[in-house]
Image (spheres, rainbow, N blue to C red):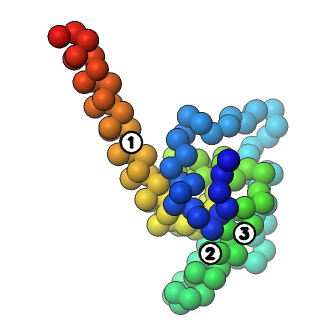
Amino acid sequence: MLQSPHQPLQVAAVPAQRTPAREDDAGPWHSEAACRRDEAGLFFAPSKEPTAARLAREEAAKRVCGGCPVMIECREHALMQPEPYGVWGGLTAAERRVALARRRRRDIELKAATTAEHIAAAG
């Protein structure tokens, strides 16, 4: 079970293969997104936004994401693209960079472990 969007770095390590797939006949995932209109401008920063205002805006955006039915699809989209700006799937751009680095490191470690197992089995 995912934790609240206020603890995004713990949620960010969800492996891609464990995310639910969407049916194509249901339409694009973003058609069900809670933020699809973003009338309040919560998800992308205006230029020269002060830090305190940015943090407050990002927390408000994460609250919207927390109740979104397609949060996982949105997050995976942002991680796979990768989206360099905005709040996507409950994660800021900085949090997505951390998640991507963790995912890359995990993939490298898994590949190294698999290679070592193959070498040991052949030896």
Q: Is residue 78 above or below residue 25?
A: below
Q: Which residue is drawn at 53% across and 57% down?
A: 10
Name the amino acid, label 1.
Answer: Arg
Question: Which residue is identified by label 3?
Answer: 63
Name the amino acid, label 3.
Answer: Arg
Which of 39/70 is in front?
70
Which of 10/82 is in front?
10
Q: Distance from label 3 to label 1 (Cα)?
A: 29 Å
Q: Which residue is drawn at 66% across and 52% down?
A: 2
Q: Position of residue 4 (x, y in %)?
A: 67, 61
Question: Which residue is identified by label 2?
Answer: 58
Q: Horizontally, is 61 left or right of 11 in the view? A: right
Regarding residue 81, the answer to whether it shows in the image is no
Q: Position of residue 65 (x, y in %)?
A: 71, 62
Q: Is residue 89 above or below residue 58?
A: above
Which of 75/86 is in front?
75
Q: Is mark 2 on a helix, strand or loop?
A: helix
Q: Is residue 80 above or below residue 55?
A: above
Q: Horizontally, is 114 left or right of 123 in the view? A: right
Q: Horizontally, is 30 left or right of 58 in the view? A: right
Question: Which residue is identified by label 1?
Answer: 106
Name the amino acid, label 2.
Answer: Glu
Q: Distance from label 3 to label 2 (Cα)?
A: 9 Å
Q: Where is residue 56 in the image (x, y as percent from the top left)?
A: 63, 82
